[in-house]
Image (cartoon, rainbow, N blue to C red):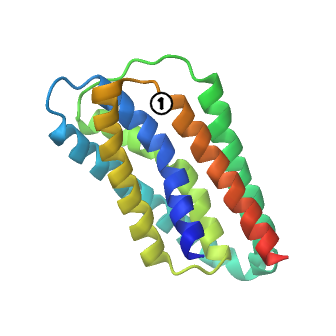
Amino acid sequence: MGIELFFIAVGLSMDAFAVSVCKGLSTQGNCRKTSIVTGIWFGGFQALMPFLGYLCGEGISRYITAVSKYVALILLSLIGINMIREAVQKKEEHSDASLNPKIMLPAAVATSIDAFAVGITLAALQVHIIPAVLLIGCTTFLISCAGVHVGNIFGSRFEKQAAVFGGIVLICIGLRIFIAGS
């Protein structure tokens, strides 16, 4: 589950990457502070949400272990399809350069809700959660920091493609788990 977990982390971080690109667009000049603060918010919540999902999933994992490959396929595919749908239907939005918690908290929660469902899947697959959430959080931190810099330099050209890529990765991982479990 090692490489799959890394790709799950990358897939989950694509929403945060897209929002980070927007943060970079609205940041003038040196964006070091913006990238670090954005990375901490998004990486922190991307680590917290699967942990919470895992805790919830632990209670029901003994009931779903027998069908864990189906749970993984369905949840990861639904999350991936939703990411792709949102990217395709996404309208141009205004991004606020503020790092105020009133701005960052809703953005961090919104970009990490799908990670909660992944946490339930990780419980069903009996994954060791601490290394998993550390990998997810650190990956998202780094990708979010990079997103701010990409947005600051290149603009919003890659925002939709990143979300679509993340969705495809999650669907492929769901299929891989399903096929490997058969």
**Mark 1, residue position:** 158
Residue at the spot x=67%, y=61% of the render?
173
Q: Is residue 11 above or below residue 118?
A: above
- Secondary structure state at the residue bearing disc 1: loop
| Left or right of 128, for residue 176 | right
| Left or right of 152, for residue 2 | right
View extreme (front): residue: 154
Q: Residue 41: give x, y in percent of width and height.
A: 31, 49
Residue type of the residue flagged with mark 1: Phe
Closest to the observer, 125 or 172: 172
- How many labels sit on residues? 1
Q: Residue 19: give x, y in percent of width and height.
A: 41, 34
Q: Is residue 136 visible?
A: yes
The quadrant in which residue 151 appears is top left
| Left or right of 70, for residue 41 | left
Q: Residue 18: give x, y in percent of width and height.
A: 45, 35
Closest to the observer, 35 or 67: 35
- Quarter of the figure with the N terminus: bottom right
Q: Is residue 170 above or below residue 21?
A: below
Q: Is residue 112 above or below residue 61?
A: above
Q: Residue 20: give x, y in percent of width and height.
A: 36, 37
